[in-house]
Every structure is written in C-alpha cells, then in structure tokens.
Amino acid sequence: MRIRVNPDLCQGHNRCKALAPELFELDEIGNAAAGWPLTGTVADQAGLEAALPAIRAGAGPVFHSIKVKAEDLPLAMPPKDGAFLKDRFRLALLGRA
C-alpha cells in the first residue's frame, strides 16, 4: 500500500495516525509523515542550512517541506521612449557600426 500525505490539505488533527498507526509516523512538529524515516519543515535560510546535512546524509528516502516566502518585489518597467527602443533594438541586432 502506498500513502502520500498532502501537506497543503492536512489540517494536523492526526486522525490518520489514530486510525492506522502502523502506516503513519509523525515528524518533529506532529504532522503525519506516512512512513518516511526523516521528515521536516524548513521555513527560513537558517533552517535550510541546519537541514541540509541531514538531507544529504539521510539513509533511504528523506522528505523536507521547504516553504518559500512570496515577496512583492519592485517592478522595473521598460522605457516608453520610441527612439530609445528603436536604437537599442538596432544595436542588439547589428552591433556598433
């Protein structure tokens, strides 16, 4: 039997562990791990650096959920000057004459 836990849908109630304890294990924060010998969650750069040795040296399958923070980065809008765009395009195509 193959079981995969979807961490996005898991609400952390551990009913799966209560119903089938032989199929599920809990990670260090109490989430179901579905029999993975080594699991974890990484939320920042320091956590990633701490988890990398265990990930690289882990025997058998290793699962770590790495959370990436979405940031609103400033947008760089292209110039709207037609002559500048034309000259830049020609320079890219033909090079310096």
Image (cartoon, helix red, strand yellow):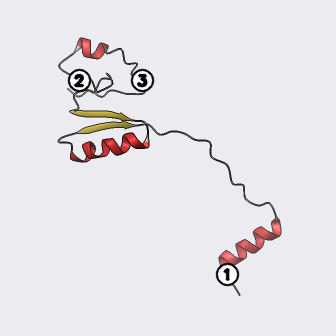
Q: CA distance from mark 3 to mark 2?
A: 17 Å
Instruction: State the residue position of label 3.
Output: 9
Q: Residue 39 appears in which quarter of the rendering?
A: top left
x 22%, y 39%: residue: 61
x 23%, y 22%: residue: 24
Q: CA distance from mark 3 to mark 1?
A: 54 Å
x 70%, y 77%: residue: 91
Callouts 3 and 2 close, C-beta under 8 Å: no
Q: Amino acid at mark 3?
A: Leu
Q: Residues within 10 Å of mark 2 (few under 14, many from 20)?
A: many
Q: Position of residue 89 (x, y in %)?
A: 71, 72
Instruction: State the residue position of label 1.
Output: 94
Taking depth in this image into account, of 79 and 30 the one nearest to the observer is 30
Please report whichever mark, 2 or 1, sits nearer to the chain's N-terminal start: 2
- For discs 2 and 1, the disc positioned in front in the rendered view: 2
Residue placed furthest toward the bottom: 97
- For discs 3 and 2, the disc positioned in front in the rendered view: 2
Q: CA distance from mark 2 to mark 1?
A: 63 Å
Q: Amino acid at mark 2?
A: Glu
Taking depth in this image into account, of 90 and 67 the one nearest to the observer is 67
- Left or right? Give the position of 37 relative to 6: left
Q: Is residue 16 above or below residue 85?
A: above
Q: Residue 93 appears in which quarter of the rendering?
A: bottom right
